[in-house]
Image (tube, rainbow, N blue to C red):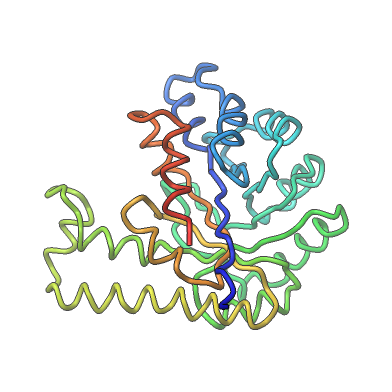
Amino acid sequence: MPNAKAKMTLGVNIDHIAVLREARKINDPDPLMALAICAQSGADQITIHLREDRRHIHDEDARRIIASSSLPVNLECAIDPAIIEIVCGLHPHRATLVPEKRQEVTTEGGLDVVGQFDAISLAINKLKEREIEVSLFIDPTREAIEYCERLGTQWVELHTGSYANVYAMLNSALPHSHHAIEALRLSRSELDDRLEQSYSDVVDAANYARSLGLKVAAGHGLNYQNVSPIVEIDTIEELNIGQSIIARSVFTGLSQAIKDMKTLCQR
């Protein structure tokens, strides 16, 4: 009898609850209130991003969430030494090191594990000294994965933005959206080829990382329409999804939005 496929776990990123709060610079909604709902609705992990510019999650949010969550907390952060010191003090279950640019709307790509090797290594060593599990958010390339192995991280999280963007170009229902406008410049066959290539890159990277003994997560731009093919990649064991879940929760409630995504994550 064949072995059942490994379970796909879901980390729910609750940053966008704080984004909504910061739109009015008040104390409502409080991201802390999402913790029990996430746990009761089948989430396996809470993910938050403590950015250097504190545009959504604040230090006190991170402290309260880590102290109160019944689920493991994955804290995304930059490699800046001052931020790493804060993360060491907060002591989350995992720290995921990500690139940051002040002008970006959201994280635009993976870490430069080649050019920033020494700085990343220093951050990893400090986190490991505090017994904090470490993941690196990277583009899905073999070179990046090889450098991650050299750096001694336990996890890699593959940036799925290229796959998600091409998927949106092929399926956008909004005629004035960025993806729809860009798609007008390309033929359907060119878009199909791009989607196939971007998906193949994720598959190859996941398989290669697992072959080197790394645990593999994925995230960025994943939603209810495009997630199923990613779920079918056996060597990916965790997805971290935020914006699409929080967006759906406006209409369905947070609990149902998480349950809907969990259903799609079943293998």
On screen, residue 82 above or below 5: above
Q: Which residue is drawn at 43% across and 65% down?
A: 230
- Does residue 49 appear in the picture of this structure? no
Numbered disc total? 0
The image quarter containing residue 172 is bottom left
The quadrant holding residue 41 is top right
Give the left or right position of residue 163, taking residue 92 as reference: left
Query: Which of these two is toward me, 159 or 213?
Result: 213
- Outermost front residue: 1
Q: Can residue 105 be seen in this view?
A: yes
Q: Position of residue 105 (x, y in %)?
A: 41, 46
Check the image and name the residue furthest to the right. Answer: 129
Between residue 75 and residue 106, name the one nearer to us.
75
Q: Position of residue 108 (x, y in %)?
A: 44, 58
Residue at 22%, 75% in the rendered image: 192
Please determine whether, in this image, residue 99 is positioned above or below residue 23.
Answer: below
Q: In which quarter of the image is the N terminus?
A: bottom right
Q: Residue 61: give x, y in percent of width and height.
A: 65, 30
Q: Nearer the viewer, residue 15 or 119?
A: 15
Q: Is residue 209 left or right of residue 91?
A: left
Which residue is at 74% across, 45% downward? 92
Give the camera-side residue of 2 and 197: 2
Q: Which residue sits at x=46%, y=73%?
A: 202
Residue 11, given in percent of the width and then of the height, sits at 57, 48
